[in-house]
Amino acid sequence: MLGYVTVGTNDLEKSAKFYDAIAKEMGVGRMMESDEFIAWGEHGGSAGIAAMKPHDGNAPSIGNGVMLALEAKDQEQVKRLYDIALANGGSDEGPVGPRGEGFYAGYFRDPDGNKLNAFCMG
């Protein structure tokens, strides 16, 4: 059902560095880009992520309660994604570890404050 998700950015270059590194670990790259946005993913693959300057010209803002969840292959990839996020301008929002029966995750924010997590089940 989900095709893609967009996050607003104040600094497309900074977002590009962050999401390029995340996408590389996930095995995808940029699939579309312009002066206003960059989209990562794979045409015909699972949902992609785009970082963009808001069309209305106003500053982007983060949504309270909004989060992008990145499905990892295993617990090791969850840890790598969390570490990559923090190494590329992200900030900690909850360390990697079990979050209930069968759910393992690490939480972080991108350079603009948008909340993400990397998770795996089982």
Image (cartoon, rainbow, N blue to C red):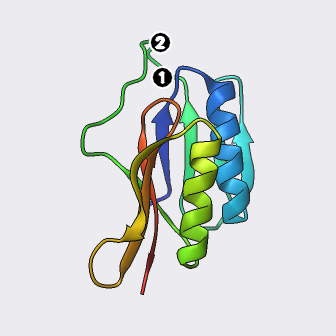
**Label 1 amino acid?**
Pro
Instruction: Check the image and report above or below for 106 versus 30.
Output: below
Q: Is residue 86 toward the left or the right of residue 23 in the image?
A: left
Helix, strand or loop at mark 2: loop
Q: Which residue is mark 1?
A: 54
Q: Which residue is mark 2?
A: 57
Q: Residue at x 58, y 47 (%)?
A: 85
State the quadrant of the N terminus: bottom left
For the residues labelled 2 and 1, the Cα–Cα distance comes to 6 Å
Helix, strand or loop at mark 1: loop
Question: How busy is the neighbourhood of tag 1: few (under 14 within 10 Å), some, or many (20 plus)?
Answer: some
Q: Is residue 83 toward the left or the right of residue 101 in the image?
A: right
> Which is nearer the eye, 40 or 117?
117
Give residue 51's position: percent from left, percent from top.
56, 36
Give residue 56's position: percent from left, percent from top.
43, 16
> Which is nearer the eye, 3 or 49?
49
Q: Residue 38, which numbered label? A: none
Q: Quadrant of residue 16?
A: top right
Q: Residue at x 52, y 27 (%)?
A: 9
Give residue 40's position: percent from left, percent from top.
66, 49
Instruction: Check the image and report above or below for 111 versus 121.
Output: above
Q: Quadrant of residue 107?
A: bottom left
> Which is nearer the eye, 68 or 88?
88
State the quadrant of the C terminus: bottom left
**Residues tagged 2 and 1 counted as in contact (Cβ below 8 A):** yes
**Label 2 amino acid?**
Gly
Q: Residue at x 55, y 71 (%)?
A: 72
Question: How busy is the neighbourhood of tag 2: few (under 14 within 10 Å), some, or many (20 plus)?
Answer: few
Instruction: Check the image and report above or below for 122 versus 106.
Output: below
